[in-house]
Image: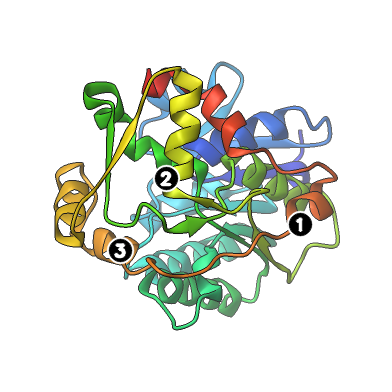
Amino acid sequence: MSGANKIFVTGGTGNIGQALVKLLQKSEAMSVRVLSRDPARASATLGAGIEIAKGDLQQPATLEAAMAGCLGAFFLADAGPKLAETAGAFAATAKRAGVRHIVAVSSGTIEMTPKVALGNWHLAMEEALTASGLTTTFLRPDNFASNALRWAGTIRGKGMVFSSNADGQSVPIDPFDIAAVAHVALTKPGHEGKSYVLSGPNVMTMREQVAAISQELGKPVNVMEVPAAGARAGMIQGGVPAIMADAILELQGHAPRPTNTVLQVTGSEPRSFASWVRENRAAFA
């Protein structure tokens, strides 16, 4: 298939990326190329028939050849203070490779007042991509439903979730719905220059999310309140970088708002948190 119809995907083996790759596969007029540091592993995850290019977002010199022939690109990188630097290098390389349009996963935390670290990092990322002169579409999702996977270990082992903010609210969004919006933005005209605030259908407390998992498992899952310092230590012990743990804790107390953007862009209602739990039951069982 011609490069004019090829989409370059970063994060292709993650929750959003895998869903996006599957959607692009179904688009008869499109083809996809996925970036991976380990092509063999990516191929095993995504299945046969997916073009894999070896490269690393943190090594821009590996990207230009990987992106050659693609006119659209999906950008997803780990959040942190260097996010804008990563995005700027990616955009500069994409421009040299002939890419014209970048769809990037940003964050709904940009909308928060007062400003928070996660929002600042993602706003700087957006500015770096825009400065390249390429057309862009920014997706600003609320809390990913898949963030609940952080609780999977203690749910399996102890039937327990530890939290310093059990009554804190979010509007959890299924990663599939983020991918669905990205798919439309990458394959249909009219989304250039847009920023989309994305959410699931319902405002939920963390306690309500745990209750949904408990209901799906058919067994009690309890929530234990812990001090913020204890929650921070638990996240770090679970592999979350300290700077990210601090950024997550900073979100406590912010009031979320649902949007109907997923429906407006895709024509389909966003999936519920309960449906996401049902599809991912094995992770908690």
Which dot marks residue 207? 2
Are discs 2 and 1 less than 8 Å apart at CB?
A: no
SS of the residue under disc 1 = loop
Which dot marks residue 260? 1
Decide if residue 36 is on the left or right side of residue 265. Answer: left
Q: Earlier in the sequence, mark 2 or mark 1?
A: 2
Question: How has the structure been colored for display?
Answer: rainbow
For marks 2 and 1, give the CA distance: 24 Å
Are discs 3 and 2 less than 8 Å apart at CB?
A: no
Closer to the eye: label 2 or 1: 2
Type of amino acid at the residue the image marks with label 3? Leu
In front: 125, or 244? 244
Residue at 46 percent of width and 51 percent of height: 63
- Residue under circle 3? 249
- Residue 166 in picture, x, y percent from top left: 36, 52
Decide if residue 203 is on the left or right side of residue 206. Answer: right
Q: Is residue 13 visible?
A: no
SS of the residue under disc 2 = helix
- Residue 107 in picture, x, y percent from top left: 52, 63
